[in-house]
Amino acid sequence: MRITPAQRNENENRIRAAMDRLLRGEIPPGGKCDINTLAVEAAVDRTAFYGTRPYSHLRVEFERRLQALQQAEEIPDPREAQIVRLKTESIKLRERLAQSEQTIDELTDFRTQALARLAAQHEEIIRLRAAVAGASRVSRLPAPRSTVIGTGS
């Protein structure tokens, strides 16, 4: 079915208006910032945007403007912006988790070494006490007495 130049002009105006709304971030519920949503919002058949169809130049313009916004890190689709934000956050959290695991491994190794040193020192103390107890020339000092300071009564 052929359309008149006036109808084509009207369709292009609707498409451009819908394009502007989508690129401003006014995404309808259930829609995205894409050609399908553009076609639905402009009430135009989606296939009219492809190949040698009458509105293919508008699809190219829409994609160029969308890409320019994305390169400027301005994402009109809030869901896409959320996806990008969540991916970035996920990467940062994975890095923090890897750092935490490395720190835990280092602290576990330190704990193991400290316990081994303490056990070795304890064994050395026991050995030295046994050696002192067996020597007759060494006398033990009496344990210090605790002195209580009077209360003045």
Image (cartoon, rainbow, N blue to C red):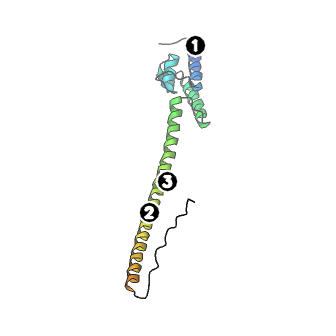
Q: In the rendered view, tell whether residue 44 sits above or below residue 121.
A: above
Secondary element at tag 3: helix
Residue at the spot of label 1: 10
Disc number for residue 111? 2
Residue at the spot of label 3: 99
| Three-letter code, disc 2 | Arg
Out of 41 and 91, give the one closest to the viewer: 91
- Mark 1–mark 3 CB contact (< 8 Å): no
Task: Compute the Cα span from label 3 to label 2.
Answer: 18 Å
Task: Compute the Cα span from label 2 to label 1.
Answer: 77 Å
Q: In the rendered view, tell whether residue 92 sits above or below residue 51.
A: below
Identified at 57% across, 18% down, the residue is 12
Q: Mark 1: few, some, or many residues within 10 Å (few <14, many ≥20)?
A: few
Q: In the rendered view, tell whether residue 4 sits above or below residue 132.
A: above
Secondary element at tag 1: helix
Identified at 43% across, 69% down, the residue is 118
Out of 101 and 95, give the one closest to the viewer: 101
Residue with the most extreme right position:
72
